[in-house]
Image: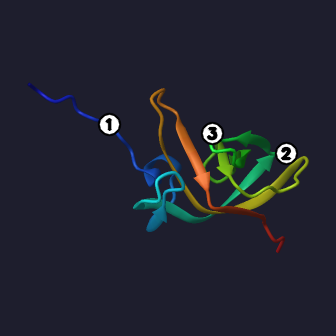
């Protein structure tokens, strides 16, 4: 039987930044795997993060972000809470993501911090 061609794009193709391979450990299974990540990405957070309670009871936070360099708007989940109001520049570390069945994407970062003004 013939195979259907797949059109999966990489994280670097979707967001337009270079990625690196990083070893990560699954919180659910404990297995080690390799993921493409953007080591540091500066984005604009719009408003306070939304608390999300995961199946295992762990709290994560969903940040609505805007990338001024690439003119993209999306949401990033992170276990770190930043008390943000209004619009602030932040830096996400080890941003990773992938495709969902609906054609959109999911994005997750290891940490987030306020960007230092120069």
Residue 42 percent coordinates (x, y): 68, 61
Residue holding disc 3:
55
Q: Is residue 72 left or right of residue 20?
A: right
Q: Earlier in the sequence, mark 1 or mark 3?
A: 1
Residue 22 lies, with reference to residue 65, above or below; the image says: below
In the image, 88 versus 25, the foreground residue is: 25
Secondary structure found at label 1 = loop
Q: Residue furthest left?
A: 1
Instruction: Name the quadrant of the N terminus.
Output: top left
Secondary structure of the residue carrying tag 3 is loop
Task: Give the secondary structure at mark 2.
Answer: loop
Q: Quadrant of the C terminus?
A: bottom right
* 76 left or right, relative to 98: right
**Number of other residues with Cα within 10 Å of mark 2, as a class: few under 14, some 14 to 19, many 20 or more:** some
Q: Is residue 101 above or below residue 92?
A: above
Chosen colour scheme: rainbow
Q: Which residue is mark 2?
A: 48
Residue drawn at point x = 79 percent, y = 55 percent: 81
Question: Which one is in front, 92 or 87?
Answer: 92
Q: Residue at x 52, y 51 (%)?
A: 28
The residue under the point 77% across, 49% down is 45
Locate residue 47: give its quadrant.
top right
């Amino acid at each position: 039987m013939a195979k259907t061609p797949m059109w999966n794009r990489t994280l670097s193709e979707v967001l337009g930044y270079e990625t690196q391979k990083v070893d990560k450990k699954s919180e659910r299974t404990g297995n080690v795997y390799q993921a493409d990540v953007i080591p540091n990405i500066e984005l604009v957070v719009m408003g306070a993060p939304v608390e999300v309670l995961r199946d295992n009871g762990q709290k994560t936070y969903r940040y609505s972000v805007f990338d001024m360099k690439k003119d993209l708007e999306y949401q990033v989940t992170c276990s770190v809470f930043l008390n943000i109001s209004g619009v602030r520049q932040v830096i996400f570390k080890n941003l990773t993501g992938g495709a969902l069945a609906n054609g959109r994407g999911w994005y997750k970062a290891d940490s987030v911090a306020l960007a230092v003004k120069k």
